[in-house]
Image: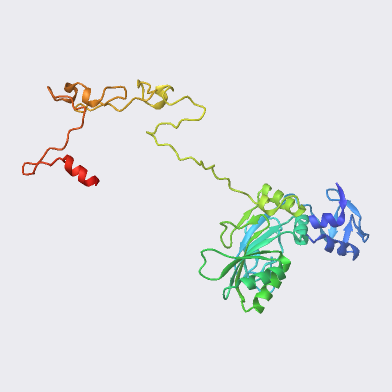
Amino acid sequence: MIERLQKIIARAGIASRRHAEELISSGMVTVNGRTITELGSKADESRDHIKVSGKLLRPASERVYLLLNKPAEVVSTMSDPEGRRSLRDFLHGISERVFPVGRLEYHSSGLVFLTNDGELANRVLQSNQLRQTYHLKIKSLLTFEEIEKLSRSTGARISRMRGAEMPWYEVTLAEARRDALRNKLFQFGHPVEKMKRVAIGNLSLDSLGPGHRRELSSAEVASLSKLLDGKVTEKSAAPQKHAAPRSRRRPEHANQKPRGKWDAEPRGKPDVESRGRPGAQSNYPRERRPEHADQKPRRKWGAEPRGKSDAESRGRSGAKPNCSRARRPERANQKPRRKPSASSNSSRKH
C-alpha cells in the first residue's frame, strides 16, 4: 500500500512524524537508491527499499505493546552512557525493537509504556487530554487552601490516599504539568520525596510488581486508541468489574414459608403443597384458637345473661341464678353496716 514516507518511518518506530519530516528534508532518506528531499513523497513499504541514515527500513511484522513497572533509580531509556541500569535490563526475551513512550525520572518508579508502533506512540506524546495518575509522598500534609491553589495553577486533581500513615496523595494531571506541580510543592515547603506513576489513561499497573512487565491485550490497545481520538472517556475506557446484582429483599430461610405476592390468591386458598405442608387443610377463613380442656366455654353475644343461664354450665350444680350482683360478704369480726334512717336523711337535707 502506498503511503507517505514520514508515516512509514514513524510506524517503524525510528522517529516521530515531525522528526521524520526533518530527516527527509535533510536528505537522510532514500527510496530504491534515490535520495528524497520533498515532503509528501510516497512509497510502498512492502515493495520499495527504504533507507534511513543508511539503514534499511524493515517493516514490522508484529506490533508489540508492553507495560513495565519501572523500579526507582533506573533510567527511562534503552541504554545509558554512564552505565546505569536501563529499561533493556528488564526486557529479556523480547526480540522486537521497542522504545519507551514518554519519560519517567530516574528516582521515580511506576508505569512505563513501551511499543514498536511509532504512530500510536506519536499520538500519545502529542495528546493533551490523556491524563496520568501519580502517587506522591511529600514531606508534610497539605492544607485545603494549598490544595485549591495547586489545583488552579496546575489543573491537577489532588486527594489524600486513605489508610496511609504518611502524607501520600493521589494526583491526576497531564504529563506536561508534572514538573510544574513538583516546583509548586517545593515553593509551598512540601518537597516531593517519592513519586510513582500508576496509570496512563486506561492503562494501569494493578498488581504488577516492580521490575515485571506484561503485554497489552487487543481490547486495551483499542480502548487507548479511542481515548486518544476523544470518542470515549477514561472512565468508560477503563475495564470495569461487574459485581453480581444485590437483592434488596431479605433472603428466605430454608424452613421459611414463601412470601405471598399481591397478585396471588389469599393465603387460605392456595395449594397447600406450595407451602411445604403436604396434606394440610386450608385455613380460610381463619379458625379461632382451640379451647383448653379445663377452660370454660366463651359466652357469645346472642346468649342469655349470666344470671339467667343454666347453673350447670358454671360447674355449680343447684346454684341459684344471680341476676343482681352479690355484695361482698361481711367479715367475721366486722360490725353490720347501719342503714340510713328516714330522720337522718331529712336532717341532711335541712
Q: Quadrant of residue 118?
A: bottom right
> Left of 322 or right of it: where is 214?
right
* Camera-side residue of 309 and 336: 336
Report the residue at 90% width, 57% height from top.
33
> Left of 279 or right of it: where is 56?
right
* Residue at the extreme right: 38
Percent position of residue 48, x then y? 87, 51
Q: Quadrant of residue 169?
A: bottom right
* Camera-side residue of 54 and 122: 122
State whether residue 216 appears in this view. yes
* Camera-side residue of 190 and 285: 285
Percent position of residue 270, x then y? 44, 23
Q: How many marks?
A: 0
Report the residue at 52% width, 43% height from top.
246
> Left of 227 or right of it: where is 319?
left
Q: Quadrant of residue 137?
A: bottom right
Percent position of residue 267, x then y? 43, 26
Q: How is the image coloured?
A: rainbow
State whether residue 53 appears in this view. no
Report the residue at 17% width, 42% height from top.
343
* Residue at the extreme front: 350
Query: Eyeballing the image, is 106 above or below 57?
Result: below
Query: Eyeballing the image, is 202 above or below 177?
Result: above
Percent position of residue 264, x then y? 49, 26
Query: Eyeballing the image, is 298 above or below 1?
Result: above
* Camera-side residue of 215 and 137: 137
> Left of 257 or right of it: where is 90?
right
Report the residue at 67% width, 50% height from top.
236
